[in-house]
Amino acid sequence: MERIGIDEFMLPEKDWPAGNKPAFPFEYMRYVAFVSAVKSLAKDGTCSFHPFDWGTLSISQEPRTVTRLKPVIIEGVSSLNPTLCDLYDIRVFVDSDRTTALQCAIDRGLGHWQTQWRELFMPSADLYMLTEPLTRAHITVAGRGASELEQRSHNKTMQPTCEDARG
């Protein structure tokens, strides 16, 4: 299994636009590169990009190549972006509540980015949610912060149509 995550397309903080504010598409990401990689993977069966190195907080010098020789998961906030979702065979939305998502990030260790999580990343994700990604998902799963009862009532099964089939 292969994976492409939106977090691999982070911009180094020094390259963020001046006056960076919550936005979608995300201004603190190499969002055009993310979209391009996913589109290339769908069209050509392969894509190459330079992932963000979380150890050095910079873009890696080593390119990463992903192919469709194995199943590929595209994950992260905005992976059901309206310009991308038709490229996927199966679209899954994991619905985590905002409070536990933020707490999980804090528990992983945000370093000096705790303010950015509260004032930039989470509000930007809220703007993405205004695009109604749940309406583009085949399957919706209750994630962090959902009780067992909510999970049972929240999950829906995939109802593929002929239009969803890929050759």
Image (spheres, rainbow, N blue to C red):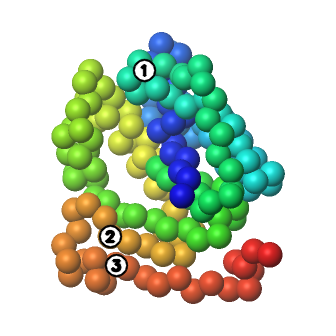
Quadrant (top left, top right, bottom left, bottom right) of the N terminus: bottom right
Between the residue at mark 2 and the residue at mark 1, the CA separation in whole angstroms equals: 31 Å
Between the residue at mark 3 and the residue at mark 2, the CA separation in whole angstroms equals: 6 Å
In the rendered picture of this protein, how many numbered marks are placed on residues?
3
Residue 49 in percent (x, y) is at 65, 34
Circles 3, 2 touching at the beta carbon (< 8 Å):
yes
Q: Quadrant of residue 144?
A: bottom left
Q: Residue at x 20, y 45 (%)?
A: 103
Sequence-wise first label, 3 or 2: 2
Name the kind of residue labelled 2 in the image.
Ala
Quick check: can you spot residue 135? Answer: no
Q: Quadrant of residue 156?
A: bottom left
Look at the numbered disc 1 and give the secondary structure of its residue. loop
Q: Is residue 131 left or right of residue 150?
A: right
Crowd band around label 3 with a 10 angstrom C-alpha radius: few (<14), some (14–19), many (20+) = some
Q: Residue at x 55, y 47 (%)?
A: 4
Residue 133 in percent (x, y) is at 52, 62
Quick check: can you spot residue 49? Answer: yes
Q: Nearer the viewer, mark 3 or mark 1?
A: 1
Sequence-wise first label, 3 or 1: 1
Q: Is residue 130 left or right of residue 145?
A: right
Look at the numbered disc 3 and give the secondary structure of its residue. helix
Residue 118 in percent (x, y) is at 28, 35
Q: From the viewer's perspective, is residue 92 above or below residue 109?
A: below
Name the kind of residue labelled 1 in the image.
Leu
Residue 47 in percent (x, y) is at 71, 43
Where does label 2 land, which residue?
142
Q: Residue at x 26, y 21 (%)?
A: 112
Where does label 1 land, which residue?
57
Q: Is residue 89 left or right of residue 80?
A: right
Between the residue at mark 3 and the residue at mark 1, the CA separation in whole angstroms equals: 37 Å
Where does label 3 land, which residue?
154
